[in-house]
Image: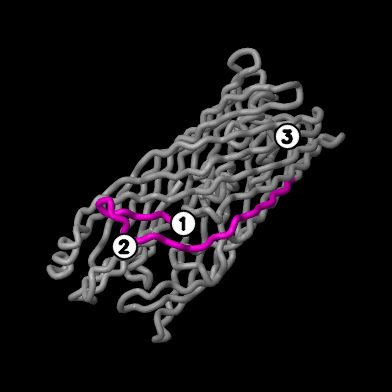
Amino acid sequence: MYTNILQSPYPRRFSLTTTAKTLIDFSSNCCHNRIESITRQSIIRKILPIILGLIAVCSAHAGGPYPAQTGISAAADSASTAGMNPAGITRFDSLNMRVDLLGFFTDNTFEGQIGDSGATFRSVDDDATVLPSGNMVMPLRDNLWFGFTILGSGFSEDYGEDWAGRYFIQEYSLLYISAFPSLATKINDKLSVAGSLAITYTSFEQDRAFLNVDEPTQDGKLNIDTDGFTVGFGLSALYEVNEKTRFGLVYRSELDPELDGKAKFSNLTPKTEEILDTAGLLNAKIDVTSRSPQAITAGMYHEFADTSVLVFDLIWADFSEFKLSEIYVNGNQTVEAEAIYDDIFGISIGYNRRLNDRWRVGIGAFYIDDMIEDDKRTLTLRLDALWSAGIGFEWQWKDNRVISGSLNYLKIGDAPLTSPSIPIVGSITGRYTERQTIWLQIGMSFGSGT
């Protein structure tokens, strides 16, 4: 269903870069369009460079594992620091690489009521998503290091053609390909800094039912297919108090991508097609824009005398400046969303210890508060506060090979909501009665470590 709770290490993961669900209310009395766009998956993705885009669990010598999005800012003990805190790549004196596979398995049940008729419905979503990621760090010359992270991610969800909210969304698919090159240097023996670019290609497609004004029992269909590139930046620092204790700070810029494509209608009645043609909406060019918030993460790493490790991170995202995707038709803005969001705050903590010369085990947990109040939530924005907990392992397979894995549980609140009124159907009210995700990680590090 979704891939990064922090889209990629640099928001869009997160958030999260942007996806859009589009709602168009069209009546025969007036040619009126209202377009709202956003998906819960896109928001989740934005919130998580902040959270799950950093899901590439770190590893290596006296370090990981770091399950449940822990060790984000200051661990810096595997090549995955290239995506989490690039300033940490100065801790490596040779080429190191890491590859990860992440699997997300969701189990969601949404129950609600349609209009004033008292009719109820139940929507079940069981989905699986697999995401790859790769990281590399290497010294270039005296006091200059290079880091690179690439993430491929994708989502898809099919609500069915006959569900109550089909005029909001029926199905969508989303593809992200993100690259994060970084350069880092040491200011002195304790302080390292880095600058990064966030280069992301996004492809988004969605289908939804469209109300035929003269034949409401026969749905038409609207398909929106868009893609585009966006570039942001990141700044980071790592301060090493000594060999056992360090602090990290990471800033990720706002991203404001624009996705270009077309709105394609099908199965329209002649009257509806005539109205849309007159309004210039048939095969209209669509620009989908959505602003992802800037974000800051700060964290601490401490290794005890017995080589056990404690990590702690704080997360902030400027979600009060977040804007719902706006859709422009042939250059004319048809609507501007005015939802009010709150900044979000998160916290993560993890602990791991050595079992023997080859094995380490760890536990971790994180919590992120809600970014929107219950009375402002809509059918297409069904987020709530979330928390996760996990366990993990790390195995020193060879001197220059480390394998790690984690099993994590993610829970999101029940997100009660009331939708805007849909023609013929009326408003939809409801909440989740089940909403949970199991996510698994397996990865391998190559290199001599820090």
Q: Residue at x 12, y 68 (%)?
A: 270
Does residue 158 appear in this view?
Answer: no
Report, in whole angstroms, how far the alpha carbon at label 2 lies from the one at label 1. Answer: 19 Å
Report, in whole angstroms, how far the alpha carbon at label 3 lies from the one at label 2. Answer: 47 Å
| Residue type marked 1 | Asp
Residue beneath label 3, please? 63
| Label pair 1/3, CB-CB below 8 angstroms | no
Q: Is residue 170 above or below residue 322?
A: below
Disc assigned to residue 267: none
Instruction: Give percent across and percent down for residue 328.
Output: 31, 54
Q: Earlier in the sequence, mark 1 or mark 3?
A: 3
Q: Is residue 392 above or below residue 22?
A: above
Residue range (magenta): 324-350
Circle 1 — which element?
strand
Asked whether residue 349 is drawn in magenta, I would say yes
| Label pair 2/1, CB-CB below 8 angstroms | no
Asked whether residue 113 is drawn in magenta, I would say no
Residue beneath label 1, please? 127
| Residue type marked 2 | Arg
Name the front one of labels 1 and 3.
Answer: 3
Q: Earlier in the sequence, mark 2 or mark 1?
A: 1
Instruction: Give percent across and percent down for residue 90.
Output: 66, 24
Residue beneath label 2, please? 208
Does residue 137 appear in this view?
Answer: yes
